[in-house]
Image (spheres, rainbow, N blue to C red):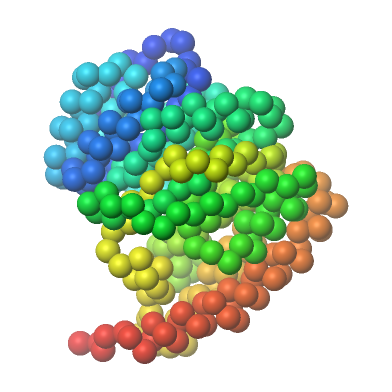
């Protein structure tokens, strides 16, 4: 990925940290200070915080520079132009030097023992690649809401990925914000959807998570260590954007599921490097595909179609 930077390239210390934290941000002056405060106050100190500012036009840049000036572990980079959400996430990973990596959204909150608790679990299990905790949702004021806890641990790769695919719950992909071994994460593939869905980022984390669960074990911490910021009506966040044509909407949703499940199969195969193990995951993939295309997406689609505003 080519991305010119308007700020001078930061000078990083020669000794690589244990943990790298990637913070992609764009125009988030309201919450970035709280998010960075949580990260610099982690009780595990051997870390670097890589902020990639996606050409913000508000006070985000000045706030980040203040944090970088006060803490040498922070590397602030401002992109000279907006490179898109996915590329900004990828950029922070590409710059990471740590053995472990965490993505931290610029409006989420973390308990100060988030890194240390997850790292403790992963250090016990050399064959495990990811760790995450129970989490809750917070609104714009920081008020805590519903708690979520997903344990994807299982003896086999197919068992772990089946749990991810078949769990009938939203927010299960939030473990993209967990702690991962950097070498595994950097070998994952970030997919872009085809055709009519080319500009959407919906469900884009699932192939990466499938690769990680196929590659190695998963550590779960039951304590609530992560707080996911939710803005506005949660039902609106997950509602399907309905096209003016119902048939066009049906086509978009069906194609998205085809795109996704092809990517999931390929990610699983790349993670296990085993044809036999890949065959074992096909029933779960088929069940997931049928559930989303025949029931879940169609149900949401028709509900959304009934609510859509008329064309002007």
Residue in the image at 62% along x and 56% along y: 164
Residue at point 71% right, 32% down?
127
Instruction: Say left or right for 92 vs 183.
Output: left
Q: Residue furthest top?
A: 14
> 174 and 267: which one is in front?
174
Snapshot quadrant of residue 225? top left
Q: Residue furthest right?
A: 276
**Is 177 placed left or right of 119 in the picture?**
left
- Residue 268 seen in render: no
Quadrant location of the C terminus?
Answer: bottom left
Provide residue 1's location: percent of width, then percent of height: 43, 39
The answer to which image quadrant residue 271 occupies is: top right
Q: Relative to 295, say whether 21 is above or below.
A: above
**What x and y, as percent, mark residue 245?**
39, 87
Spot occupied by residue 162 in the image (x, y as percentages of width and height): 69, 58
Residue beneath the point at 58% across and 77% down: 293
The count of marks equals 0
- The answer to whether residue 268 is left or right of residue 27 is right
Does the rendering let one see residue 226? Answer: yes
Q: Residue at x 44, y 29 (%)?
A: 113
Instruction: State whether residue 300 is above or below residue 176.
Output: below
Q: Is residue 198 found left or right of 158 in the rendered image?
A: left
> In the rendering, at what x and y percent does residue 284 appear?
72, 64
């Amino acid at each position: 990925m080519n991305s010119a930077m308007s700020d001078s390239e930061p000078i990083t210390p020669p000794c690589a940290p244990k943990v790298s934290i990637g913070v992609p941000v764009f125009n988030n002056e309201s919450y970035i200070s709280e998010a960075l405060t949580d990260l610099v106050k982690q009780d595990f100190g051997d870390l670097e915080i890589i902020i990639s500012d996606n050409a913000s036009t508000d006070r985000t840049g000045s706030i980040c520079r203040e944090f970088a000036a006060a803490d040498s572990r922070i590397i602030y980079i401002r992109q000279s132009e907006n490179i898109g959400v996915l590329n900004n996430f990828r950029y922070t990973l590409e710059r990471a030097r740590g053995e472990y990596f965490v993505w931290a959204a610029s409006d989420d909150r973390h308990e100060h023992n988030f890194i240390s608790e997850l790292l403790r679990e992963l250090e016990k299990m050399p064959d495990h690649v990811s760790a995450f905790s129970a989490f809750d949702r917070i609104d714009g004021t920081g008020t805590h809401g519903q708690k979520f806890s997903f344990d994807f641990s299982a003896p086999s790769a197919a068992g772990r990925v089946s749990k991810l695919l078949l769990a009938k719950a939203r927010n299960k992909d939030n473990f993209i914000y967990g702690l991962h071994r950097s070498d595994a994460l950097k070998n994952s593939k970030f997919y872009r959807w085809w055709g009519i869905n080319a500009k959407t980022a919906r469900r884009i984390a699932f192939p990466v998570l499938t690769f990680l669960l196929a590659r190695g074990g998963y550590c779960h911490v039951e304590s609530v260590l992560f707080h996911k910021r939710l803005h506005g009506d949660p039902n609106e966040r997950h509602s399907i954007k309905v096209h003016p044509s119902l048939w066009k909407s049906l086509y978009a949703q069906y194609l998205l599921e085809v795109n996704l499940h092809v990517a999931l199969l390929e990610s699983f195969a790349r993670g296990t490097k085993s044809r036999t193990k890949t065959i074992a995951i096909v029933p779960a993939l088929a069940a997931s595909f049928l559930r989303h295309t025949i029931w879940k997406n169609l149900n949401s689609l028709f509900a959304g179609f009934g609510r859509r505003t008329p064309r002007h």
